[in-house]
Image: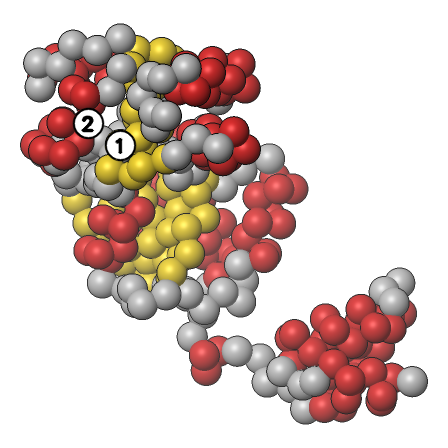
């Protein structure tokens, strides 16, 4: 049975396409591409002639079934995105799940990643990090997303579009206070730039500087010594307030335990 090959493509510099990726694109029967026009330029650069099928957010269900049917019939397929690793914050994620359901083997051909590349040059902690993708333009969803990260200790990585950057920089300062922030733009391209700054400076000065290009934001996590410390009585009081707000006693104790570091049972006993 043939396979689905997940092939990473350059995020700006065509020289970053690996020899293995070239060999794979030459060997498969067809290519599933986010934008066939963009992928055609890549294929032409390497003199690869291969039929393509568009696969993107708005046709992923229909095309996913077609791709899987062709693979099950004996063809091999490579999935690519316009830039970087497909299936990461990308509709290809659904195709992987569909292949799993249908028993289709998947093989990864690693390539450039804006997430890891930006992290590597950020100057921030790299041992533990989390990728948060794009922040929603919906105010409620955006606020909930940022609130959920307020106490995140790991380095956080976001994607952002230049026209949304001013609002995002101000939001990062409002929600997280003054922390280290690295803005990486146009990775691997001629105008690649790494700006190591803080959320305060970014919100007050850089938000209005007209930064352009494809942007990755790398934000410092909350320092351990910034974590709130509770006594047991304060943890119990917190749980009591949650209970008064309509939460069940057991749930209130669990929530307070997660925030304070005390055991849920100890808080629960004090409550009852």
Residue 53: image quadrant is top left
Residue at 19%, 21% (x, y): give it. Answer: 27
Near-viewer residue (189 or 49): 49
Residue at 72%, 71% (x, y): give it. Answer: 255
Left-right relation of 56 to 248: left
Image quadrant occupied by the C terminus:
bottom right
Residue 70: image quadrant is top left
**Kind of element beneath mark 2:** helix
Image position, residue 165 (x, y; %): 39, 39
**Kind of element beneath mark 1:** strand
Left-right relation of 162 to 19: right
Near-viewer residue (102 or 82): 102
Disc 2, disc 1: CB below 8 Å?
Answer: yes
Question: Badge 1, how many Cα within 10 Å: few under 14, some, many 20+?
Answer: many
> Looking at the image, which residue sits at the far front?
1
Residue at 80%, 69% (x, y): give it. Answer: 251
Report how far apart the C-alphas of labels 2 and 1 lie in the structure.
Answer: 8 Å
Label 2 belongs to which residue? 24
Residue at 21%, 11% (x, y): give it. Answer: 50
Q: Is residue 17 visible?
A: yes
Image vertical order of residue 265 relative to residue 30, above or below: below
Image position, residue 100 (x, y; %): 49, 35
């Amino acid at each position: 049975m043939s396979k689905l090959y997940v092939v990473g493509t350059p995020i700006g510099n065509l020289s970053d396409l690996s020899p293995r990726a070239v060999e794979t694109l030459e060997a498969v029967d067809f290519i599933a591409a986010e934008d066939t026009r963009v992928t055609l330029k890549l294929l032409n650069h390497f003199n690869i002639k291969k039929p393509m099928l568009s696969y993107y957010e708005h046709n992923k269900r229909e095309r996913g079934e077609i791709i899987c049917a062709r693979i099950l019939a004996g063809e091999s397929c490579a999935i690519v995105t316009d830039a970087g690793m497909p299936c990461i914050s990308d509709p290809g994620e659904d195709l992987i799940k569909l292949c799993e359901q249908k028993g289709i083997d998947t093989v990864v051909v690693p390539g450039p990643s804006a997430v890891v590349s930006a992290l590597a040059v950020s100057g921030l902690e790299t041992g533990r990090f989390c990728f948060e993708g794009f922040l929603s333009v919906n105010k409620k969803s955006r606020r909930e997303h940022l609130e959920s990260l307020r106490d995140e200790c790991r380095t956080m990585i976001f994607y952002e579009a230049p026209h949304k950057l001013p609002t995002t920089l101000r939001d990062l300062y409002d929600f997280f206070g003054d922390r280290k922030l690295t803005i990486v733009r146009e990775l691997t391209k001629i105008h690649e730039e790494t700006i190591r700054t803080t959320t305060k400076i970014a919100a007050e000065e850089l938000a209005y500087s007209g930064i352009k290009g494809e942007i990755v934001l790398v934000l410092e996590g909350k320092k351990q010594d910034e974590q709130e410390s509770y006594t047991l009585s304060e943890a119990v009081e917190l749980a009591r307030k949650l209970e008064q707000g309509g939460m069940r006693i057991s749930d209130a104790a669990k929530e307070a335990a997660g925030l304070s570091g005390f055991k849920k049972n100890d808080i629960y006993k004090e409550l009852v």
